[in-house]
Image: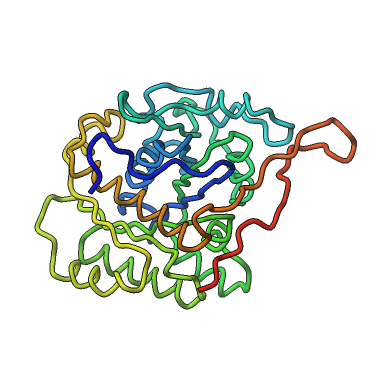
Amino acid sequence: MARKDQPAVPPLPDGARLVVPVMGPGTGGSGRSTVAGLVASAMASAGPAVVLDLGLRLVSPWSAWCTERGRGLASIPPDQPLRRSDVLAAAAYCGSPPLPTWQVLTDHQDWAAPPLTLPSDPAAWYQLSALGGWRTVVADTAHPITHDIVSARSRGTGGITAAWSSLPFAVPILCAAATGVGVHAMQQAVHALEAESFPLKRLVIALVDQANDRQPPVVKAASTMLAPRVAAVVPIPYDSALRTVGLREMTRLRPRTTHAAAALARAVFQTAQTTWGASLGTAEQPAPYNRSPEQTHHRTAHQSTHAEVPA
């Protein structure tokens, strides 16, 4: 266990970028947003980190959790070239100094404003985060993972889960409530991933205690059985501060919660190094906009940089 004054993970190598899609078996109740914030807070010590809020504005907690608002996603035009300064101005800040702070791209519009149409393609979000220059990109996704996998399989097409997981240097986190029902949903999601030949050794599982009860035997059994098959199983303890102020006041979190956040970050970092090597390679960078007819939009310079290390 790292000391309180030690960062959870070492600084990411120059040019590296980790993508951490945080997903849940259903549309809510798995602690997905909390886990996304915890891993971003711990990874922020390794370099600039951002959370991409993919949820609907009226059910997302992120606007309330921000300590310093940005211009919001509504300020980013979907059909015009962008500068890095535009993306950074749209991002809000989260976290409480002296702890590391991180940023979040979310929708700050009033509740009565028309819904914002967000891109469904993970590549668009990756391109946006690359333009922002963040080292760690945490996606707080909104799709139910098992339904997405089964639906995509029945259609014979790729789903959102597969698209997020195939991004360069992506280490997904699957969240589940630490209850019998939550573990059952999580096991179904793992079976669906395995059926689609997803490499489970690149998957981190977060079991979130939401009731401060003793862990049911079924949860302990599931955790024990899954631990050898996935990259890591990390328990997230109950914290009353998360129920009252969420992640707005990080200094109020209990030490065991910050230790769990550090364990999540270490699991992600170690999984990435095991998969792609200690250097993590060089992430794709946005191509400069030169206003030529051939380059009418900002785009990412594509490179083959994320081949997995042979076993």
Q: Give above or below for 246 relative to 274.
A: above
Q: Quadrant of residue 43?
A: top left
Q: Position of residue 262 (x, y in %)?
A: 30, 46
Left or right, 142 with reference to 281: left
Task: Point out the residue furthest to the bottom here.
Answer: 195
Q: Residue at x 25, y 45 (%)?
A: 2
Q: Quadrant of residue 299?
A: top right
Near-viewer residue (178 or 28) = 178
Near-viewer residue (212 or 113) = 212
Q: Position of residue 120 (x, y in %)?
A: 59, 50
Q: Residue at x 29, y 38 (%)?
A: 6
Q: Quadrant of residue 297?
A: top right
Left or right, 43 with reference to 277: left
Q: Give above or below for 49 relative to 260.
A: above
Q: Give above or below for 217 relative to 69.
A: below
- Figure colour scheme: rainbow
Left or right, 251 with reference to 284: left
Q: Residue at x 35, y 41 (%)?
A: 42
Near-viewer residue (113 or 68) = 68
Q: Residue at x 88, y 34 (%)?
A: 292
Left or right, 202 with reference to 256: right
Near-viewer residue (108 or 254) = 254
Task: Point out the residue furthest to the left here.
Answer: 214
Q: Give above or below for 50 relative to 157.
A: above
Task: Point out the residue furthest to the front here.
Answer: 278
Q: Position of residue 309 (x, y in %)?
A: 54, 66
Q: How many marks?
A: 0
Q: Position of residue 247 (x, y in %)?
A: 30, 34
